[in-house]
Image (spheres, rainbow, N blue to C red):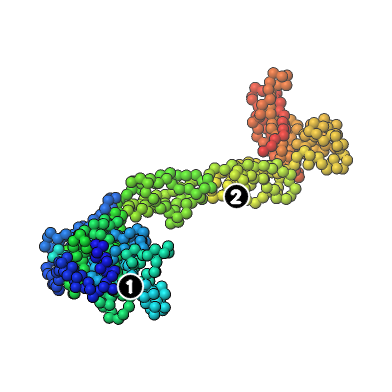
Amino acid sequence: MGTFYLLESTIAKYQPMISQFLTSLLYCILGFFIVTSYADAQSEVSVTLGNLLQTYNGTARRASAVTDPAGFATQITYQNLNPNAPAPTTDVVFDDTPPTLALSYFSYGFSAAQISAVGNNVQLGGTSRKLESCDVILVNHAKAANWPTLSAANPLGYIHPIGIAIYELSPTNHFILRSEATQNILIPWRPLTQSNGEPYPFEGFAFRANIPFVNGITLPEKVLVVLKFNTQFYGEKPIGVDGPYNSLNVGYVNSLNTPLIGTDVNSDVVYAFRRGAWSIISGSRTSSVPMVRLYASSTQTITPPINAGNWQATAAISDADYDVTDSQILTVRPAAAVVQLAGLSKTYDRNPINPSVTTTPPGLPVSLTYNGSEIAPTQAGRYDVSATITNPNYSGNTNSTLEIAKATASVTLSNLVQIADGQPKSVAVTTHPPELATATTYSELSALPTALGRYAVSSVITDSNYIGSKSGELWLGQNLESWISPWLKAGSIPENLVGDHDDPDQDGIPNLLEYAFGLNPAAPDPFGSNAGSPQAQFSAGELSLFYSRNLAATDLDFKVESTSTLDGSGTWSTAVTRDSIISTEGAVQSIRATLPMPAEATRGFARVKVSRVSP
């Protein structure tokens, strides 16, 4: 191998002397065969895809392929057609280039070897199969100093087209071209020496060139990667002009080298094209392969899909003699799943409320909508709930109703006793939670009362998220303090004689009763007179009690009581009376309360009990 390199690297100097020797050497080690144009019976062979409708089950979903005639091996590739397909990635599917580029390598010189192209038959690794690009390691022996005119115009190097062809090699040794691409590459000048002053090993400068394939093909499992470029004498298209072209070589490694990715199909074989025919370079001294790296896109892969969706499945007969394919849509349907809702009766708590969700299989993501909205409700009410599994590999949904009940709130009424002054009066309403909206009525009317009296009060929470109410009674009238105030202000009553039991006019009737009966606290009122103090009358077996009632005294309770004796052996009890209103003058009402007496009764006693009360 070393001798082969020396012949390459010194060919420019000693070409006339070694040309005959090199030609003889190559003829000794090359076994030639020529690929002729060949027509196969394409129309007599077919491949058909099947099993194209499947259901997700967590394992790979493979299409099937049947050939006619039967027995042909096939390769099936898959392209993701789903809208949510992952972004394509570029993967290395074959690589026998060094991880770190050395300064130089042994190399093929097309002029020295009298060949036009060189390649290697490889089997791809990985799963990506859409051809993207190819890297090659080239070695340039040309120094800028040897080409002063060209290097003056191009100080970094010279531009040269590098081509890559991808062939498929049939079992009958036919080369079928699958794709080819050419890229103009900057060929860097070889520096005179390394940075440390040492000469370059193998007298060349190694660099990596990348040739993209714009219209990538779907790669078969085994391909022949062929490198070609122009030289002055033996390149793909000899250019016939003077230049550094014959100094551009192809870096190579021993064919027994194990590729980093993929497999060398024939570890002792290198293919070359010479004088219009393909040759096999074999033998331990010369069987060295060009260093290449193939890139492929994940948009087409040999990995069958697992997830639900649509894939473009393409089946190709794995025989380069037959360019026969079938392309169909493989559909993987989502598997059926069950989704269940619970906790559909909740109470308003100011927070968003969701029902609980379970799925079979468990743990699947679920999308919930409430009356068509994805926002979980917080307000009390009824909501149509729709639950749909969002894992693309499963399908399932259910509908139900979420009911958020109103929360219970408390209502408190206060200021239930007020002085009637002709102005509308309202009670004070507080809620817990605070400041909830309420509707309050007074004796079933929404209008605020102004007249004397007692009014049934009902306050109901109207907030849409709470329920609660409170009933009470508004007493609109006077109290002793407001009633006696005019006499106090006029100086008719001393300031120290305004209590319930005080008797400023010394008529034996205390202020509370004066207030109750609508009497004058500043002037004597004889007890039992017609001035309004209670009087009793017995007639026709009935006992009647006459008394006056101050209608403005809404804070007082009047109760007629009776007893059969006053000697202490009897007790006072509330009497069942038949009441009639004798007259009403201003705020004072005269009342006759009649008590039926037992037939055997010879006497009876009655009284009016006045007591202070509050709502």
- The residue drawn where x is 52% and y is 45% is 349
* In this picture, residue 589 sits left or right of residue 312: right
Assign a secondary structure to mark 1. strand
- Looking at marks 1 and 2 on the same chain, the residue that comes earlier in the sequence is marked by 1
> Of 83 and 394, which appears nearest the observer?
83
Q: Is residue 572 above or below residue 189?
A: above
- Residue 394 in the image: state x and y as whole percent: 32, 52
What's the CA distance linking mark 1 and mark 2? 80 Å
> Of 58 and 215, which appears nearest the observer?
215
Q: Hey, which residue is sitting farthest right in the picture?
A: 491
Q: Which residue is mark 2?
A: 437
- Image label count: 2
> Of 394 and 572, which appears nearest the observer?
394
Which amino acid lies under the numbered mark 1 shown in the image of this protein?
Gln
Image quadrant where one finds the C terminus: top right
Q: Which residue is mark 1?
A: 183
| Nearest to viewer (mark 1 / mark 2) | 1
Residue 520 in sight here = yes
* In this picture, residue 389 sits left or right of residue 548: left
Q: Which mark is residue 557?
A: none
> Of 586 and 477, which appears nearest the observer?
477
Q: Residues within 10 Å of mark 1 (few under 14, many from 20)?
A: some
Q: Quadrant of residue 531?
A: top right
Assign a secondary structure to mark 2. loop
- Residue 337 in the image: state x and y as whole percent: 32, 49
Q: Is residue 210 above or below residue 405?
A: below
